[in-house]
Amino acid sequence: MAAMYSCKYIEVSATIDLHIDDLFIGVIRQIRSLRRQRNSQRHRDPNHHRHHRRHSQRNKRTQARTVERGENFPERGGASSPSAD
């Protein structure tokens, strides 16, 4: 089945602790390698930074409009907490 999907095949056993570390290390290496490839491709794109700048400006405008209307606008990456007023 691994050959059918062009994947590596590693026989592992959690019971006798066979190749568990090798499998985990291999998966982590693959993830890091793919991230490096994606990051290097993004930085080669001349429009990459312009794209981020545009989205950042749009988010600031949206947040300003929401604040003007008196709506709660949670900060990025966290849940908003109710105020103690």
Image: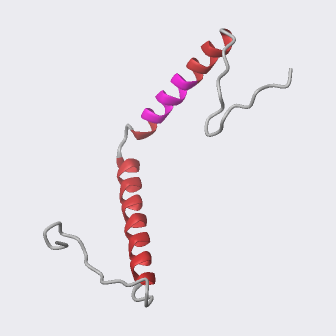
Q: Quadrant of the C terminus?
A: top right
Residue at image coords 38%, 48%: 42
Q: Residue furthest left?
A: 4
* Percent position of residue 7, x then y: 23, 71
Please state the extent of the stretch shown in magenta in the rendering: 50-59
* Percent position of residue 32, x then y: 43, 65
Q: Quadrant of the N terminus?
A: bottom left
How was the colour assigned to the protein in this rendering? Answer: secondary structure
Front one among 69 and 40: 69
In this view, 23 is above or below 45 = below
35 vs 74, left or right, is left
The magenta stretch spans residue 80? no
How many marks the image carries: the answer is: 0
* Percent position of residue 22, x then y: 41, 83
Residue at image coords 37%, 54%: 38
Residue at image coords 13%, 69%: 4
Front one among 51 and 33: 33
Residue at image coords 37%, 41%: 46
22 vs 83, left or right, is left
Our reading of the magenta stretch's main secondary structure is helix
